[in-house]
Image: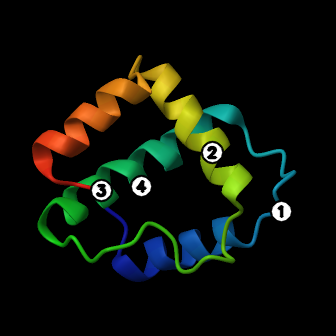
Amino acid sequence: MSSPEDIAAAIRLIADLPPDSDLPQEDLQVALAALIRIFGYRNDTDKSLTPVAGPNSVTATDVMLTVTSLMRTLNIQFFELGIWQAMTARH
């Protein structure tokens, strides 16, 4: 298993990639899925955790495209998201 320092170094390398990087699709999928699982776990216990460092770290378009694709991939409808948010008081 990699050390926390190795993981932090790898994340910094990924963060420095340009948006048009030719990162293989499978690697992108594996990395995104891992980060989503970690964020989901941590956010479940720490509601103050935010998914990005600040408003300038990603664009609204980046977020909308990613969220839409995630929801389509998992067959989640926006209505279902609204119901889940209402039932769990997560907004």
Which residue is disc 1 drawn over? 18
Q: Residues within 10 Å of mark 2 (few under 14, many from 20)?
A: few
The answer to which of marks 4 and 1 sits earlier in the sequence is: 1
Going from N to C along the chain, the mark reached first, 1 or 2, is 1
Q: Secondary structure at mark 3?
A: loop
| Identity, as a three-letter code, of the amino acid under mark 4 | Leu
Q: Nearer the viewer, mark 2 or mark 3?
A: 3
Mark 4 residue element: helix
Q: What residue is pinned by disc 4?
A: 35
Q: CA distance from mark 2 to mark 4?
A: 18 Å
Q: Nearer the viewer, mark 3 or mark 1?
A: 3
CA gap, disc 3 and disc 4: 20 Å
Q: CA distance from mark 4 to mark 1?
A: 19 Å
Secondary element type, mark 2: helix
Residue 51 in the image: state x and y as whole percent.
44, 66
Residue bearing mark 2: 64
Q: Amino acid at mark 1?
A: Pro
Which dot, 1 or 2, sits closer to the camera? 2
Residue at image mark 3: 91
User: Could you tell me which residue is drawn at 50 percent across and 40 percent down?
Assistant: 30
Of helix, strand and loop, which one carries label 1? loop
